Amino acid sequence: MAQFTYSRLSHLLRKCVNKPSVLRAGIDTQHGPACFLQFIRCQRTVDSKALQERQKQQMAKGLPKQKPISGVKQVVIVASGKGGVGKSTTAVNLALGLSANDPSKSVGLLDADVFGPSIPKLMNLKGNPELTEKNLMIPLINYGIPCMSMGFLVEDEAPIVWRGLMVMSAIEKLLRKVDWGSLDYLVIDMPPGTGDVQLSISQNIPVAGAVIVSTPQDIALLDARRGAEMFKKVNVPVLGLVQNMSVFQCPNCNHQTHIFGSDGARRLAETLGVRFLGDIPLHLNIREKSDSGQPVVISTPNSPEAEAYRRVASAVVQRLDEIKT
């Protein structure tokens, strides 16, 4: 099978972005102030009519029609308004938790953070995806979870320096050009913020629900609220909030310290009228296992922190069932 590489993807995207535009034919003019003014008036009339016509076409188009991802039953997106709150670690352990709670369910993981892909490191995966006969990328698999990420197409330290159009084209290919097989759940690790990628994904595919991750810190909660409000505006159900790094327990004396504050995400969930999905502690084991590519749900399944992720996964499934009914 052929391999789908970063250089090949970049070539395809540049071909799409750099298509020659159709320029309006010029208008023959004569020299002189009167002719010049007449030309300006004509040009403004033409521009105004063209603008009105484009606006009519855009209004007629409306929002893009949602098209399901082939073979995927439900899409769950994991988002945060701010980076650095543990969103990717939560997404990975949520996917593994869904699989651990019900082994009969098939779960996939998509890394939609084009500029800062974390899934390859967290899932201990490397290499370029192979292609099917239909030129679909085949996800890389570890711990029974098929994964796709821009990180599989670039070197570990290579920056992705792309403008918006190329990013959106890449997202489209990650959504549509992957052979996921048959999945009960596809967990999408979103980039932080409320920008083009979030809007594009939520408007182009049917999303079963969004999980918002935040620390209890006030500054993180401000952005978490913006993220939740954005999903409500685009009619994506907010499954609930996960409070990450909720409490630190000293490994020597077991004293608990709320480094980032206490119950901030729980209060925000009540304010927004959404479900509080659970607490994830600030624990050394989570950090060490994540850095080594061995998520705690797999590496230490009986630990309290792994149980916390599985409880969150159970709460997510419960909310999905509620929304269905």
Image: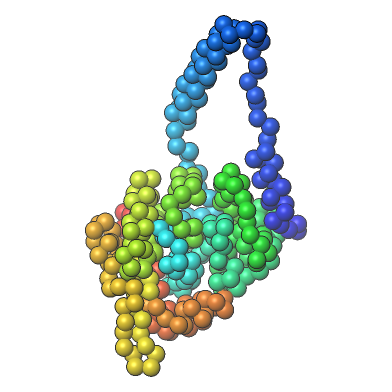
- Residue placed farthest to the bottom in the image? 252
Note whether residue 200 is visible.
yes
Looking at this view, is 33 or 116 the one in front?
33
Say if 323 sits above or below 287 in the image.
above
Classify residue 253 by image quadrant. bottom left
Looking at this view, is 178 or 169 the one in front?
169
Q: Residue 87: x percent and y percent?
A: 45, 65
105 sits to left or right of 157: left
Note whether residue 320 is visible.
no
Q: Residue 255: x percent and y percent?
A: 31, 88
Say if 54 sits above or below 106 in the image.
above
Q: For the point 61% across and 50% down, which residue is it?
A: 162
The coloring applied to the image is rainbow
Classify residue 37 by image quadrant. top right
Q: Residue 283: x percent and y percent?
A: 42, 81
| Count of numbered badges drawn on the protein | 0
295 sits to left or right of 194: right
Q: For the point 46% across and 58% down, which residue is it?
A: 192
Q: For the point 48% across and 39% down, which residue is it?
A: 65
257 sits to left or right of 37: left
Q: Residue 323: x percent and y percent?
A: 33, 54
Image quadrant for the N terminus?
A: bottom right
- Residue placed farthest to the right in the image? 2
Image quadrant for the C terminus?
A: bottom left
- Residue placed farthest to the front in the image? 33
Q: For the point 41% across and 73% down, which residue is it?
A: 309
